[in-house]
Structures are given as C-alpha cells and as structure tokens.
Image: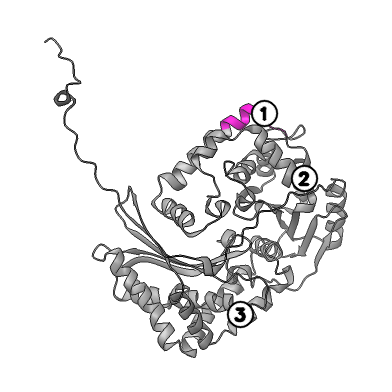
Amino acid sequence: MLRYAGLLLLAGLSSVQAETLFSTLPNGMKVLIKEDARAPVAAVRLWYKVGSVDEHEGKTGLSHALEHMMFKGTDSVPEGEFSRRVAALGGDDNAYTNRTETVYTTNIAVKNLDEVLKMEADRMVNLNFSDKAFDNEMDVIREERRMSTDDSPAGKMWETLNIKMWDKPFNKAPVIGYMNDLHTLKADDLRAWYKQWYAPNNAMLVIVGDVKAKETTDKVGRLFGGIPARPLPQRNDEAERTTDAREVNETVYAVTAQPIITLNWRVPHAEKISDGMPYALEMLGLVLDGTDSSRYSRKLQRGDAVALDTSAGYTDFGRKNAIFSVFAMPNGQTTPEELKKRLLDEIRDIAENGVGKDELALIRTPVETRRIFARDSIRSQADTLGELEHNGFGWKSEDEIVRRLFKVTPKQVQSAARLLLDSPMAQITVLPQKAEQPQPPAAAKGRLKKVKP
C-alpha cells in the first residue's frame, strides 16, 4: 500500500529517540540516515524519482522494465550477482515501481552494509545488459502482465478504471505498460531511460538501523559523491482538475465466479501538509472501512452479510492527483447493484446525519495501536521516511500528519462525504465472463474432409 499511500500510511512510524541526519550531496543526491540500535541490522532504500507518469505514448512500461534490468549486472557485478551476494550475506532484496517512483530495497546485517552500498553505487552508473538479457526479461514481464492484469479480474478492473477515469495518456497507462508496447520496446529504449533518469540528483538513499548517522553519511558521500549529476528531462504535467471529472459506468467481464464492484471519485490532492480536505477524506475512509468496527465491516460484512470483502480510502494517484476508492465483493445472494446501493447509503447517511465523536474515537484507538507496533520495524521506518520526503511533506512531518488526522472533526467528515455525493463517480463492475455459445461441428460448415474408413 505504501506505493499508493494515503496520508495515514505515510505517517506515524517514529521509533525510539535517536539521531536522524538528512543531507544533500554536492551532486544533488539526498541522504537520510536514522539510528535504531535495537538490532544489528539495517534497512536500505534507494529511491529514483521516476515512474509511469513520466512515460509517453508508445513507450509505456519503461520504468518497470528498467527496474527488472537493474538486476542484470555491471562489469564488476555480473547478472544476478547482486541478489546472490545479498542472500549469501544473510539479507534480502527487492524492488518496486509505481506511478511516481522506482525503489530498491535491501535488508542486511549492519556489518555487511558497506557491500550493499558499493553495489548500489556501482549500478547507479555502470549498468550494462545485453540485448539477449533484455529479450529474455521482456518475456518475463509480459507473463507478469498476463498474470497481474490480463488474467486477473481485479487487474482488469483497475486498468479499465484508469483508462476511463483519466484524460491524460500517462495517467491512463498501467505501470507495467500496455501489452502492445511490451512487444515493441527495445533494449536501447531502456538504456536511454536509464541515462535520462538514473542520476544522483534524481535519487534519495534512506538507511535505518544500527548505524552512526554522521559516520554513515560520510561513507555514502565517499561512495556516491563522485557520480556526476545530469540534466533531467522535463516532466509531464500530470495534474487533472477534479472539476473535469465525469461519470463512468463500465462493466468488465472476466474468468471469475465472483463479481466485484469499485466506486471512485477524483478528490483534492494533498499539495501541502496543511491542506484540510485530504485528512477528512482519510478519516472518512477509516469510518467506512478502516478497522473491524468501521461501518462496512460491521454492517455489510458481519451484520447483514451482503459483502464478502470491502475496502475504502483516500489514495494519492501520481504526484498531483488523488482518488477516493470503495471496493467490494458481493456475496452469492447480493447483486453488484444492490451492494452499490448499500455502499452509497452509508456515505449518504454520513453526509446527511454526520458521525458522532464516539465513532471517531473508536476509529482512532486501533490506528494508534498500529503506530505503536510499527515502531518496532526498521523496514517500516525506512519506507515511511522515504515516502514522506518523496511526496514532498518532509521526513520530519510524520507526527504532524497524525496530529492533524486525529484532529478531524465530525463536521469535516460529513463535508468529505458530501463532497463525494456531489462529485461525478466512476464505477467499474466485474462480472463472470459469459460462456461462449457452442459452435456447430466443423463438418456442418463443410470444412471437414471425408475420410475413408
């Protein structure tokens, strides 16, 4: 979820008091080091500020494909060797791409941190993959798309939603790319993308663990400081006005026995930490389905049992847009349209009658509990600090975000519900694919040659 984090998921993971040092190297690379000495381990996160919203028509999927190719090696670290070395040192590594960022993650014993940093610095500037390695990996990526989108009811639903809900091509496009583009991308396209965006002045390194902040910052400077900055391309203007939203009602057919419905609205994006409506929308999502005591869980799942699953919440969509989404799966006796009515009835009830202070207090308790448990994870700390800085709120803002969220009043939640009801809604419904009509035997069409007995 941090890949499409709302305000709540970006906040509240502070650990015990320890030094945190944020700096910017002369080449523009941001470095954030946080001390947490409770275990001799370190979480390493390297952000590159590039994702699918930076791509163009006909070249979708570049950022995600390059993420794959970053594991194909350099002259000093051959293909596959990065992950093998990390595993041999007792760690684990991974990566992900979304609309605004590509992030490389490593969790390692702190005594082996130097080795990881050396390899990250190496592949920031020395990536070297063959055309054959590219061709082989594109086969993997195309299969990933089949599994995650083409053959996935939920994947087809979200892709259809974005195509219908947004106007600009790079907002419509899936992060993994359209299949047609995945067949036409060339190795040189990825090499050019790498040279355009993988630069220290477009990167941020976050380390949380049993380290000394000043000492580690100096070490990072020695390893990454000599990599030259590059001029970055002009970014796409991805902002789309909420006033340009339109009603959408699309049905998608998929190989599934389980219908799905999602209701979505364009809503104000959190441009700065003081913006009020995003907090109210975040709290509205919690009231609807943020905890076991929330309305959808309590009434629609456990109470009347009209839904097998529900979710609701405020989510950033790229760097300049945001949506409020409701997702639900009806039970066998409830149609998607009947469930839609029940989902909207709860929003309408809040818009007309508001919520009580006791209801908000009941929501805050489990949220605060999750914050407490999250403090034990250096991985969560690294993810959250990086996301806060990446999203423009600043890494110090976590406590302020939670403070503002918990100050949301019943009246503000009511206003958020009214905003949804007054705004165009994008509905996507997934229904079981209709069975194909049986075809007449080929012989009946005269295509079967007579065979001698």
* Badge 1 amino acid: Ser
Seen as rendered, the residue at the extreme left is 453
Q: Position of residue 29 (x, y in %)?
A: 80, 54
* Badge 2 amino acid: Glu
Q: Main secondary structure of the magenta part?
A: helix
Under circle 2, the secondary element is helix
Decide: few, some or many residues near mark 1? Use Cα within 10 Å; few <14, some 14-19, many ≥20: few
Is there any visible trace of residue 105 in the rendered image? Answer: no
* Residue at the spot of label 1: 130
Q: Are marks 1 and 3 in contact (CB under 8 Å)?
A: no
Q: Position of residue 375 (x, y in %)?
A: 64, 70
Under circle 1, the secondary element is loop
Residue 115, labelled with which disc? Answer: 2
Q: Marks 1 and 2, how far apart in space?
A: 25 Å
Queried whether the magenta region covers residue 132, the answer comes back as: yes
Q: Is the residue 134 above or below the residue 95 in the image?
A: above
Q: What stretch of residues is rendered in magenta?
A: 128-136
Residue at the (26%, 66%) spot, across then down:
334
Under circle 3, the secondary element is loop
Is there any visible trace of residue 201 in the rendered image? Answer: yes
Q: Marks 1 and 3, how far apart in space?
A: 50 Å
Q: Are marks 1 and 2 in contact (CB under 8 Å)?
A: no
Q: Position of residue 260 (x, y in %)?
A: 35, 59
Nearest-to-viewer mark from 1 and 3 = 3
Q: Upstream in the sequence, badge 1 or badge 3? A: 1
Q: Upstream in the sequence, badge 1 or badge 2? A: 2
* Badge 3 amino acid: Gly
The C terminus: image quadrant: top left
Q: Is the residue 350 above or below the residue 448 in the image?
A: below
* Residue at the spot of label 3: 276
Left or right: 216 with respect to 450? right
